[in-house]
């Protein structure tokens, strides 16, 4: 495990906030609602109160990168959502790499192009919003790592050496100057897994993209996405991975939902369950499994739960 | 014949980068790290980010606008992560696709997302289920794990989201693209070389 980091977590999040703004994720609330629930429960467990706002909309970055609409609207939506947070004087914490990447990139474009910022602010001024760039944007995984000692102290269901293969997700690692670790070889998820009593597995393809790939699963599923995913999952299985964790519900969709299709096409049944890192932390911290929404998963978690000793 | 310095035309990248998001494109070293790390280039060698940049800087963008390749990009940004010059290639790809659509290429890769975007206009959220049964299933699941049956989004939020699409012309942009207008993709390396796996149904 590396010790020298690009940014020390204690520098990135200096004071642990008592209250944070939790940015709702569409996929994390609808496709795998257990993610939303686990993030909320884990934050509360760690004595950080998440605040949400019903006026927040989708970050709208995802459809931008599929060319479904033009950047002007995404810039205005970003300014509007972040202006809501600024009114509360809080920092923004997201639990989806998509939201993270787009909020970071779009706010960066706004704050470095006066013309775009004025244009967006003009559009949202009709409802009294103004975006000034004061709220800082974090991913909750940064909070998990910052509070790793607090987490380790609160583990009540240790993972009993469960072999976990982590998946960082491209849209986190691509923010190469803002993130906790070296984007080329990050290890902080593995350290969290160790703190929970699991065995991190450094499988070769762990940094390979999920293949959900900003919509290519809809347009290039058989041509590109499935051969790509096959490579990743085969490598994970051959390395003895028993569970994959993600920090992005979009990655979760690809890695979990495609497994039956890969079985049909290649005749190999991987059956590696895929959950959010927050769900794994919540599990180890003793949050009841009834709140973690594992029934939304295509690949069941029975073996994982048995190994951790959950009988529910 | 080898290009002479006097023939050089500057700022050809401006023809693609109309939003001024990839201002350092001309600093490209042609080192090819982007292509080495690209998961799509790995499976489909005719998709080559280094070559795309080279062609754009040489004023040869049209062959890519007409191609199938640009629609394969995962937008994973691994190319940017490794780029020694910090060129944000995905932002270039985004604009190449806009230009392809404006020239009526690649609509079939755009249309599935318009469907999602249209539904997002109603819900203020992306990827909500289309049918009543899908909605009911999710609401039950959310209820069971102690969440509100539907994500907490206000009517005000949905209304303002919709209005922003109209005010920026994004809604009009989506509606302007018609399926029947599509021109055939002229350059494609589609067949073979992707995988030897058998396709569904033989």
Image: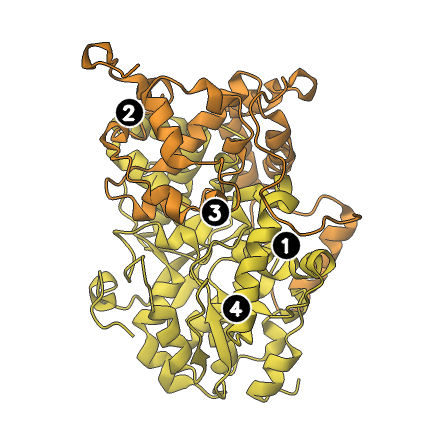
Position above or below: A63 against A13 = above
Which is in the foreground here, disc 3 or disc 1? 3
Local secondary structure at mark 4: helix
Can you identify the residue that label 2 sits on? A115
Question: Could you classify mark 1 by the number of other residues whose Cα lies within 10 Å: few (under 14), some (14-19), or many (20 or more)?
Answer: some
Q: Chain of mark 4?
A: A
Q: What is the spatial separation of the Cα atoms under label 1 and label 2, in whole angstroms?
A: 37 Å
Q: Are marks 2 and 4 on the same chain?
A: yes
**Which color was chain A given?**
yellow
Give the percent coordinates (x, y) of residue A172.
Answer: 38, 54
Q: Earlier in the sequence, mark 3 or mark 1?
A: 3
Marks 2 and 4 sit apart, C-alpha to C-alpha, by 46 Å
Q: Position of residue B182 (x, y in %)?
A: 64, 19
Residue at image coords 36%, 43%:
B34
The residue at 44%/36% (across/down) is A77
The image position of residue A102, as x and y in percent, is 41, 44
Q: Output the chain of dot 3.
A: B
Q: Which residue is mark 4?
A: A236
Label 3 in the same subunit as label 1: yes
- The image quadrant of residue B56 is top left
Q: CA distance from mark 4 to mark 1?
A: 35 Å
Q: Residue beneath label 1, please?
A: B150
Q: Is residue B19 left or right of residue B177?
A: left
Looking at the image, do the residues carrying marks 3 and 1 touch, with CB atoms under 8 Å apart?
no
Q: Callout 1: helix, strand or loop?
A: loop
**Which of marks 4 and 2 precedes in the sequence?**
2
Q: Give me the chain that's orange.
A: B
């Amino acid at each position: 495990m590396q010790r020298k980091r690009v940014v020390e977590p204690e520098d990135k999040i200096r004071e642990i906030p008592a209250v944070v703004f939790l940015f709702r994720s569409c996929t994390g609330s609808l496709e795998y609602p257990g993610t939303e629930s686990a993030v909320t429960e884990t934050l509360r467990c760690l004595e950080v109160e998440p605040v949400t706002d019903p006026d927040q909309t989708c970050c709208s970055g995802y459809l931008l990168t599929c060319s479904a609409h033009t950047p002007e609207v995404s810039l205005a939506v970003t300014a509007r959502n972040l202006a809501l947070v600024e009114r509360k004087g809080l920092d923004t914490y997201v639990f989806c790499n998509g939201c993270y990447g787009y909020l970071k990139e779009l706010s960066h474009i706004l704050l470095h192009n006066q013309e775009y910022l004025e244009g967006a602010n003009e559009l949202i001024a009709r409802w009294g919003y103004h975006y000034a760039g004061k709220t800082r944007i974090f991913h909750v995984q940064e909070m998990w790592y910052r509070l790793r000692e607090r987490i380790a102290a609160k583990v009540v269901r240790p993972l009993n050496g469960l072999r976990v293969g982590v998946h960082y997700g491209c849209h986190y690692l691509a923010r190469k100057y803002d993130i906790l670790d070296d984007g080329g070889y990050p290890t902080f998820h593995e350290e969290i897994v160790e703190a929970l009593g699991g065995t991190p597995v450094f499988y070769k393809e762990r940094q390979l993209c999920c293949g959900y790939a900003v919509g290519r699963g809809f347009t290039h599923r058989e041509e590109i996405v499935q051969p790509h995913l096959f490579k990743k999952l085969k490598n994970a299985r051959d390395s003895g991975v028993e569970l994959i964790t993600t920090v992005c519900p979009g990655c979760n969709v690809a890695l979990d939902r495609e497994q039956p299709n890969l079985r049909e096409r290649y005749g190999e049944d991987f059956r590696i369950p895929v959950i959010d890192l927050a769900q794994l932390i919540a599990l180890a911290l003793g949050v009841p499994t009834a709140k973690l929404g594992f029934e939304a998963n295509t690949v069941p978690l029975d073996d994982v739960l048995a190994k951790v000793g959950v009988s529910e | 014949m080898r290009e002479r310095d006097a023939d050089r035309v500057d700022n050809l990248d401006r023809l693609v980068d109309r939003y001024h998001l990839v201002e350092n494109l001309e600093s490209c070293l042609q080192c090819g790290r982007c292509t080495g790390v690209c998961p799509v280039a790995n499976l489909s060698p005719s998709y080559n980010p280094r070559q795309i940049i080279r062609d754009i800087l040489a004023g040869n963008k049209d062959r890519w606008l007409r191609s199938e390749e640009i629609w394969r990009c995962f937008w994973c940004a691994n190319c940017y992560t490794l780029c020694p010059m910090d060129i944000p290639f995905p932002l270039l790809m985004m604009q190449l696709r806009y230009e392809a659509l404006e020239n009526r290429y690649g609509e079939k890769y755009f249309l599935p997302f318009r469907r999602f975007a249209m539904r997002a206009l109603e819900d203020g959220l992306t990827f909500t289920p289309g049918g009543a049964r899908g909605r009911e299933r999710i609401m039950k699941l959310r209820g069971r794990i102690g969440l509100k049956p539907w994500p907490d989004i206000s009517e005000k939020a949905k209304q303002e989201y919709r209005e922003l699409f109209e005010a920026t012309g994004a809604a009009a942009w989506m509606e302007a693209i018609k399926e029947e207008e599509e021109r055939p993709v002229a350059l494609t390396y589609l067949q073979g070389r992707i995988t030897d796996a058998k396709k569904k149904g033989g």
